[in-house]
Image: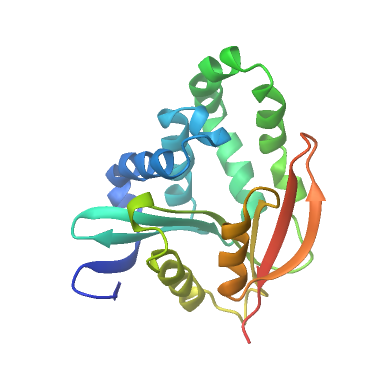
Amino acid sequence: MVQINENLSIREINLIEKDKVRKISELHREAFPDFFLTKLGKPFLSTLYRGYLEDSQSGIIVAEKGNKIVGIIAYSKDYPNFYKGLIKHHLLKFAFYSAGAVIRHPSFIRRLLGAFKKSDSVVKPKRYVELASICVNPCLESRGVGTQMIDYLKSVVDFNEYAFINLETDADGNDSVNRFYIKNGFELIRQYTTAEGRRMNEYRYYQK
C-alpha cells in the first residue's frame, strides 16, 4: 500500500475482498453513466470486475479515501487468456445479466459478440500489461488520483518481464482523457476503427 496523504491511499485488493466489487461497480456507473458496459447493468459489471480478482494474472488497484473507494484500475498481465477465462467461467452469467439491455438495445448484440472475441485481437508479439479500466469518482477528477494510481501500476510492473503497459480509449470526443494519458508518459501507437465505427487510440507506456 502507498499512503499518498492522511486521507488517500493506493493499494491492490485481493479475492478475499471480493465484497468490494459491488462498490467498484457503483463507482464505474457513477464515472461512466453513458458507457456501453454501464448500460449492461450492475450485475454484469460486478461479474466482470470479479473476474479480475479471480484471475491469477490480473488485478484491481484501488484509491481509498478513508473507507471509501474513489478510484480503480483493472489490469491484466495476460489479457488474451483473461478473456478466455471470463468466457469459460462466466458466459452464462454474462448472457443472463445482459439479456434485458439487449432486448432494449438490439444493436448491443454485435458489441457483446465483439467483446467475447477479444481474446484473439489482443494478442501481441511481446508480453505486456493491459490497463483495461480506470475510473475516478467524478467529485475528485483533476486532483491527481488517476495519476497516482497509474504511478502505482508502473511501480508493480516488472519491465524486465513485460515490454510495456498498453491501453485503448476513444479517439473522438475524448480529448481530456487522451491528454491525460500523454501527460502520464503514454505514447500513441496507432488509431483504428472498430466494426461498430468507433475510432480508437492505442497507447503504450515504456519504462525510460
Extreme residue in the top direction? 103
Determine whether, in the image, residue 139 is placed left or right of residue 104. left
Residue positioned 57% across, 29% down in the render: 91
Determine whether, in the image, residue 8 is placed left or right of residue 148. left
Determine whether, in the image, residue 208 is placed left or right of residue 72. right
Determine whether, in the image, residue 109 is placed left or right of residue 144. right
The colour scheme of the drawn protein is: rainbow
Would you place residue 203 above or below residue 25 in this image? Answer: below
Q: Position of residue 75 (x, y in %)?
A: 52, 58
**Residue 92 figure quarter:** top right
Q: Position of residue 131 (x, y in %)?
A: 56, 59
Would you place residue 157 above or below residue 115 in this image? Answer: below
Q: Position of residue 135 (x, y in %)?
A: 45, 53
How many discs mark residues in the rendered view?
0
Extreme residue in the bottom direction? 208
**Residue 77 figure quarter:** bottom right
Q: Nearer the viewer, residue 183 or 26?
A: 183
Residue positioned 73% across, 50% down in the render: 200
Residue positioned 29% across, 51% down in the render: 16
Quadrant position of the N terminus in the picture: bottom left
**Residue 108 figure quarter:** top right
Quadrant position of the C terminus in the picture: bottom right
Residue positioned 43% across, 73% down in the render: 152
